Amino acid sequence: MSDGSKIEWTDATWNPVLGCDKVSPGCDHCYAIRTAHRMQANPNPKVAAAYAGTEQGMEWTGRVNLLEDRLALPLRWTKPRRIFVNAQSDLFHADVPDDFIARVWAVMATAYRHTFQILTKRHGRMRSLLSSPAFWELFDREWCGLPNWAPRWPDHEQIPVDHTYHLKDGPLSNVWLGVSVEDQQRADLRVPALIGTPAAVRFLSCEPLLGPVDLSHWLFHTPECDAAEAPWCICHRHREGDPYFYVARIDWVIAGGESGPDARPMHPDWARQLRDQCTGAGVPFLFKQWGGARASSGGRELDGRTWDEYPESGS
C-alpha cells in the first residue's frame, strides 16, 4: 500500500484486504504472490502480520486478511488522486464479508475528492452485490457509523446528517469499476456482468493480454438501442420505473503484456487490435507495457506513441 505507485494507470494503492486465490489463466504468474512471499518475511512485525498465512511456496493459500486499521487511510490523504483499491487482492473475494465491502464503500463516499479504481475477476459477486438494495441499506448503516469505526478519524471529514442512499440515485460518481480480461473467453464471461453493474465508469484491464480480444460489442453507445436487438446493452430505459436513461458501455481500456521471470509473450497485433477498436469507438485507451522479464523490458510505446488516455471524469 502506498501513497504513490509504479502502476502506470493510478496514483496510489489502498489495500484493506490482503490475500487471494487463482481463478483464471491471468492469475498464473500473479505479481501479488511474489509481494506476499516477500512481505511475510518483513522485519517489521506489523507488515509481516498483515500478510501472514496468505502465501506458501509461492502460491496463494486462499486465506484473506481484513485490515480494519487501513480502512480510513484515504480519508487522511488530502490531495485528490486516483486510488487503486486492493492491488494485492480482490475486494469481491468470497471470503470478504458484505459489511466489510460496505465499509470500503462508505470510505469512498466520504473521500469524494479521490477517484477509486476497483478491479475484479469475481464479476458475478460484483454484479449481484452492487445491484442489491440490501447492500445499499448496509452501506447506509456503515456510512452513518463511519466516525465510530474508522480508526484515527480525521476531524476535517464530515458525514451528512440526513442521508439515505438508494440504488435509483445512481452509482457513486468517484468509483470506477473494472474487470480483468486476459483473453476472449474471459471477455465474454466478465464484460456483460460489468455492463450490468451500476457504475459511474466501467473499465477493462486487458493484462496480461494472452490472446486477441474483440470488444466491439461493448464499446459503442447506442442511444436508440432495442433490447431485443442488442441484448448485451443495459439501458435504464429497459428497467421498469427508472426515470433515467443511458446506455451502458465500456468507458476505458487498459492493455499490457505480462512481466516477471515466467512472462508469457504478447503478440503486438493483440495490442494494436484493442487500440484500434478503442480509437474507432472514441474510448480512451492506455497501453501499460510490452512486458517481459522486467516490467520495463519492452518500454511503453505502441507504434511510436505512448498511449495514456483516461476517462474524462478522472483525468
Image (tube, rainbow, N blue to C red):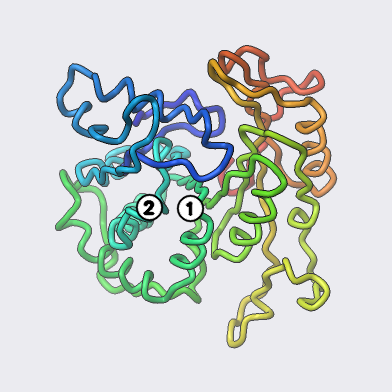
Q: Give the residue at x 82% y 29%.
A: 269
Q: Where residue 307 appears, x then y in whole percent?
A: 71, 29
- Label 2 crowd bin: few (<14), some (14–19), many (20+), radius 10 Å: many
Q: Amino acid at mark 1?
A: Val
Residue bearing mark 1: 175
Q: Give the residue at x 67% y 14%.
A: 298
Marks 2 and 1, the one that precedes in the sequence: 2
Q: Nearer the viewer, residue 176 or 132?
A: 132
Picture quadrant where residue 88 is located: top left
Question: Would you place residue 126 above or below residue 275 in this image?
Answer: below
Q: Where residue 279 appears, x then y in whole percent?
A: 81, 41
- Relative side of 67 to 9, left or right: left
Q: Nearer the viewer, residue 169 or 15?
A: 15
Q: CA distance from mark 2 to mark 1?
A: 7 Å
Q: Which mark is residue 73?
A: none
- Label 1 crowd bin: few (<14), some (14–19), many (20+), radius 10 Å: many
Assign the N terminus to one quadrant of the image.
top left
Secondary element type, mark 1: strand
Going by the picture, which residue comes out furthest to the front? Answer: 57
Question: Would you place residue 296 above or below residue 104 in this image?
Answer: above
Assign the C terminus to one quadrant of the image.
top right
Picture quadrant where residue 77 is located: top left
Picture quadrant where residue 161 is located: bottom left
Q: Which mark is residue 108?
A: 2
Q: Where residue 231 appears, x then y in whole percent?
A: 75, 71
Q: Amino acid at mark 2?
A: Met
Secondary element type, mark 2: helix
- Relative side of 86 to 249, left or right: left
- Relative side of 17 to 31, left or right: left
Q: Give the residue at x 38% y 70%.
A: 136
